[in-house]
Image (cartoon, rainbow, N blue to C red):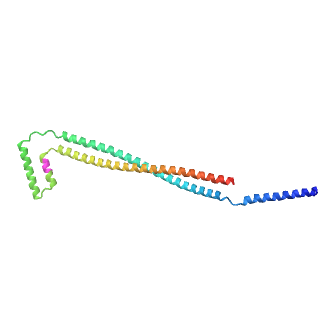
Amino acid sequence: MTGAGIWGLLLASCFVLLALLALAALSVRSAPDHPDSRVLRADADELEAEADTIAAAAADARAAADLARDRATAADQARDAAWQRQETAGRAYHQAVRVARQSRPAPAPAPVVPAQHERDVSRAALTAYRRGDLSVQQLREVWRRASDPNPSHDEADRAVDQHRMRDRAARREYDASAAVARRAGETARIAETAAEALAQEAAAAAVDAAEARYAADRSQRRR
């Protein structure tokens, strides 16, 4: 074989080799994705969607917990205000009791005539009641006035009764406010615990999704 023939053979071999390389490169570019890479991307997409869902739930739980805490704070303030009103009403009631006691000095021995007068008034009132001229309340009022005709005593007794009713109402109001505050505080604590648990779950889900996405991207780059 001459030199020209050898060079021709070599050139033909080079062309064949280049063609084979070109076909190999073309087949690599047109080959479908590796199944493992597709699975990794699908897993990453699913984990990211799940992480977004948990994050949204955690945000809603945090907002609900904040609202519950605000309500608990308001309930605590209402309870404290009710306590102050109860203290004020209690002091006013005890003061009225002291005034009523001071307005009633130790009675002197009653003479016979006032006692007889009291009995006469009582009998007359009872007779009028039996005739239907007096009601039960009016009869009791006559008896009370006959035994204690001092008007200042009546005013002191009425003041004591009024302050007693206010004191009892204030105590009932405080008891109700304290119960509301206890329930609101417990609700807030439960809501905060749930929000914290969801926040931790959302953080863990975000980490899992990031790791899955990194694995999918790494598998794609390796191809």
Q: Quadrant of the C terminus?
A: bottom right
The answer to whether residue 62 shows anywhere in this view is: no
Q: Position of residue 90 (x, y in %)?
A: 27, 43
The answer to whether residue 220 shows anywhere in this view is: yes
* Residue placed furthest toward the right: 2
Disc tally is 0
Please tell me which residue is depicted at 7% across the width and 48% down the height of the picture: 119
Q: Is residue 137 left or right of residue 42?
A: left
Name the foreground residue: 75 vs 194. Answer: 194
Name the foreground residue: 88 vs 55. Answer: 55
Q: Position of residue 161 (x, y in %)?
A: 22, 47
Q: Position of residue 45 (x, y in %)?
A: 59, 57
Name the foreground residue: 128 vs 171. Answer: 171
Please tell me which residue is depicted at 60% across the width and 51% down the height of the picture: 211
Q: Position of residue 178 (x, y in %)?
A: 34, 48
Which residues are drawn in magenta? 141-145
Please tell me which residue is depicted at 55% across the width and 56% down the height of the picture: 50
Name the foreground residue: 208 vs 79. Answer: 208
